Amino acid sequence: MVKIKNINIQTSYISNIINSPNFTISTKPLINETNKYSLYSDKILETKIQCIGPLYNQSCLFKNLYYIDSTFTILTVKGSYIPEYYIRTDAFNLWPIVLNKREFDSYFHFEIFIRNITNPRRIPYVTLYFGQPWHDNIGHALFDGLYSAYVALIRFSPRHLHPFRILAGIDECNGCWSEDVYSRFGGLGIIKQRVLNKLSNGRWFVFDEIIMGSGTFCQRCTQPNLQLPGGVELNASRLFRDRMYQQHGFIHPVIRQKSSSEYRTSHDLLQAYVIDNKRYTKNDRKEINDAINEINNYTNFYINTIKSNTSKLEWPLIHVSYLYYNQVKAQNMNLTQINATSSDSRSPTYELIENNFIAQLKILRNMDIHITGPGTGQMYQTFLSDGSVSINLGGIRPWASENTPRAYTSYLEQHMTSGAPYIKGLYYPINERPKGIKKDEVIKLIRQAGQLILQGFSLPVQPRENLAADGQLFVEMCEKDKEFCTSVTTRSPHKKFICLEFWVEDFVHEYNQWKDGGYTDNGKNISCSFNRSLLRQLREKYGIKHNLENS
């Protein structure tokens, strides 16, 4: 299933050029090419391909991949081996990328074409390519674009440990600071594909090495084990976290190898943050604030009145703050006058001062307990240090149905938790959340998190233990109903996309396409099939209450 356009360049075409009275053979190398290679001595300019993984989930490393008129082009000689490949570069495009292919009769004619006709502009070192819609949303930008491409890069170790360039298929966006994150993360900057497309109009470029094939590693690509793809088996979550800190100027975080309690004492003050979430109601916020006050009052009383550090504590010492990520700002360095020169291509302070994302990472790096509801705020849990705890307060589905018979609990990003085995996940009780967030439950969860940290939970955490009850149900369902599992986890063009648009909570509570008989949209029935009796057995096994109105 190789997707290529095959164009054969005949010998006569090259011969006509060679026999032209104005034609001379140039022995000048490509830009930046070392002079140790003599003309025709080795096939150093031909496109070579190495692919890893099955066709469904494949990443490929291309050496000498050419680009002209907005299209990647393989240039090769008759008889050269080109492996079968099927690579997707965009998490939300189920079709593979299409490459042109041009074939020459001999390497002699091929090299004349490259050196004397096309004279391509070389793009050196490693380039990582991916397409990314919605990069204005930092959750999508990080984990449906950058992370998934980085997993593909990890497959070609040790390139993921060295600086690389990013080629990003992104739309024009004036306020998308995720582009700066991309550039810093790679280390060699970012090329926007729409810019390359304009410059490649009638002009050739060649990539030294370019890696692509990340379309099945996105955080929205549901796995049978309900883990962030590559997070555990390729250690990708930890590698992604560590590189993010490294490339933004941080010293490596504390490494805890066996237990969350390493390098801690029972009297340590733990830092907890409740992250604001649009799904909180006015009453939810009041209950959360009351919980914060009660925990902080206990901690402050102990610190201010108890002098002996040997005193036995009833509860862990935890300081809880309420945090709005969008209000975390970098330190203002405007008072430090730095003059730019006319030759500066960017601010001379670019790599030396903080931006707002660095300010956010600074808080995350020292965060022991991360508390929020579903959505973008959950994405940052991947950046927590070893031995931290993520508390998912959950939300309500359908939207705005709190305290109604239709409401059920929604955790959404629990796959992010199970895919980060260096942290522990806790969840608001699944059958209690539809009643709204309550102070006592929040206090219980935060104190439980503190006790787990200081008593020492084992590292790495087993991924299945980091799932909520409905997540564990899904994993078992996938093990027992293979046809259903394939329908929601195999992202291929012939599958119903509505079944791939999968959230565990909607399935478990038989909502919309999972309802018995499905639902009707513009006169068309929308439904996905599965073993309904098995689901209901498992729902009872995991103690998940269900209102039959949803089924």
Image (spheres, rainbow, N blue to C red):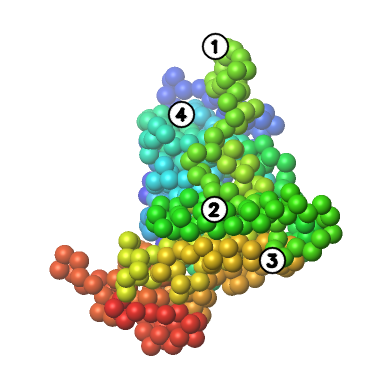
Of residues 320 and 506, the one nearer the viewer is: 320
Label 2 close to label 4 by CB (< 8 Å): no
Q: Of the residues under marks 3 and 1, which one precedes in the sequence? A: 1
Q: Label 2: which residue?
A: 274
| Residue 65 in sight from this viewpoint | no
| Closer mark to the observer between disc 3 and disc 1 | 3
Q: Nearer the viewer, mark 4 or mark 3?
A: 3
- Name the residue located 59 percent from the left edge and 38 percent from the top edge: 359
Image depth: mark 2 or mark 4 in front: 2
Tell me, for residue 117, which label it has, or none.
Answer: 4
Q: Can you identify the residue that label 3 sits on?
A: 452
Question: Is label 2 in a helix, a strand or a loop?
Answer: strand
What crowding class fits label 4: few (fewer than 14 Cα within 10 Å), some (14-19), or many (20 or more)?
few
From the viewer's side, name the closer residue of 82 and 334. Answer: 334
Distance between the alpha carbons at the discs numbered 1 and 2: 45 Å
Q: Quadrant of residue 11?
A: top left
Residue 440 falls in which quadrant of the image?
A: bottom right
The Cα atoms of the two marked residues, 3 and 1, are separated by 56 Å
Decide if residue 29 is on the left or right side of residue 477: right
The x and y percentages for residue 380 are 55, 51
Q: Position of residue 12 (x, y in %)?
A: 40, 37
* Tag 4: amino acid: Ile
Q: Nearer the viewer, residue 73 or 300?
A: 300
Task: Return the disc, 1 or 2, that comes first in the chain's sequence.
Answer: 2
